[in-house]
Image: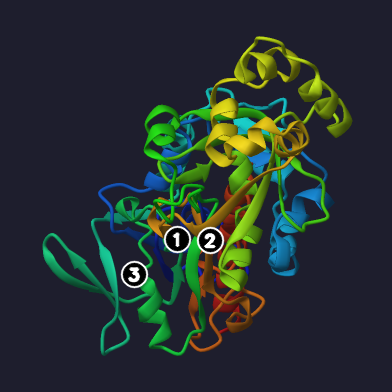
Amino acid sequence: MPSATAPVSASVAIIGGGPAGLMAAETLARAGVQVDLFDAMPSVGRKFLLAGRGGLNITHSEAFAAFASRYGCRRAQIEPLLAAFTPQALREWVEALGVTTFVGTSGRVFPAEMKAAPLLRAWLQRLREAGVRFHVRHRWIGWHADGSLAFTTPDGPRHYTADATVLALGGGSWAKLGSDGAWVPLLAERGVDVAPLQPANCGFIVASPRAEQSTGWSEHFRSRFAGQPIKSIAMRLDGDATPARPGEAMISDDGIEGSLVYALSAPIRERIKASGSATLLVDLSPDRSPERIQAEVAHPRGARSLSSHLQSRVGISGVKMALLRECLTADELADTTRLAAAIKALPLRLVATRPLDEAISSAGGVRFEDLDAQLMLRAMPGVFCSGEMLDWEAPTGGYLLSACFASGKAVGEGVLAWLAAR
């Protein structure tokens, strides 16, 4: 229904067809605003579809206070957006599109089919019915001299003029899906303060435990175990007083990645920036106390090999056993006290993130201090920003999508208020 707070004749350009841009489009179109949505890719929602390949995690069912705490140093800016469009409201919005949801054993919320495509199809149909016009293969390259938006297209340059503009261009990860960070210099040259884009929810490169190389695993370990998961473990940063997080990770070609590492990626990244490296302590047997591990490791093993002994007494085998052999010397393996300590806190020294383009998401972006309460750029009246291009980060688990949806709704409402007040 048209809104009384915005003129029906207004037109808004939205650049970026991810969840934030699409949610802004829906909010505006429902208020009677003509929306033209531009995307550089041949179709919209490409990163959203990729996120759903392994099971689309829409949001999380935990208590709101705990949910809001996941946004770290930007909680004060993100929490009001989430309060206005809560995880429960997001779930109800998804179900209104005809897509049922369920809560998994971890508390994460998924569509019943675990896929993004049905949700995106239903959403795009509703947006088209609301009058949203889509322009794909339109790469935004800034502003023309007359103030109009400038695009490159397969048919040549194109300019577009609107009453307001919403930028929802994503961060800097997965450039092939459209989030390439090319917008950073375009805003910086207009005086917008943009925090440097950095990898978030990313893998890390390990300092080699071998003298013959500086980083990465030995060829023996890498060739046999890269790509293999390490299950039933716990991790914490050395020097961090918080309890170790349980979960699983994965050995990569030159380090470690996976959900447990992603959950710790922000403090790991900041520790590396400050000190040059970060030591991750891996508990290979989190269900057993240090005292029990010590007793089991020290138990006489007779003629059995160390591998057989640890498998029967502690349940250490496969990639866990190989990791101990990779990281410990022969003397340390032979010392039951040092071996037991390593099983409970195996140190992995991490020295660098994997490249930004490989990360699940990115940190950095337009600083909230350069935005007003409606997410409009203070330096550029009528230009609004939303989604991952804002300076915030969160772990996987539904938190990324929730904030993108919520910021898209908030920016749509901000545009309506600004149009009405002109």
* Residue at the limit of the structure toward the right, as seen here: 291
Question: Where is the C terminus found, in terms of image quarters?
Answer: bottom right
The answer to whether residue 146 shows anywhere in this view is yes
Left or right: where 66 falls relative to 180: right
Mark toward the start of the polypeptide (1 vs 3) = 1
CA neighbours of label 2 inside 10 A, class few (<14), some (14 to 19), many (20+): many
Q: Give me the disc on residue 387.
A: 2
Q: CA distance from mark 1 to mark 2?
A: 6 Å
Spot occupied by residue 279 in the image (x, y as percentages of width and height): 64, 55
Q: Secondary structure at mark 3?
A: loop
Q: Residue at x 72, y 55 (%)?
A: 238
Amino acid residing under circle 3: Ala
Residue under label 1, please give it: 170
Task: Specify the label residue 145 is tagged with.
Answer: none
In percent of the image, x 53 and y 61: which residue is there? 387
Q: Disc 3 versus disc 2: distance between alpha carbons? A: 15 Å
Q: Amino acid at mark 2?
A: Gly
Q: Is residue 396 visible from the viewing direction of this image?
A: no
Amino acid type indicated by mark 1 = Gly
Residue position marked by numbered label 3 in the rendering: 182
Q: Residue furthest left?
A: 155
Q: Position of residue 104 (x, y in %)?
A: 69, 26
The tag earlier along the polypeptide, 3 or 2, is 3
Q: Secondary structure at mark 1?
A: loop
Quarter occupied by residue 107: top right
Mark 1 and mark 2 residues within 8 Å of each other at the beta carbon: yes
User: 165 and 2: which one is in front?
Assistant: 165
- Spatial CA distance of label 1 from label 3 is 10 Å
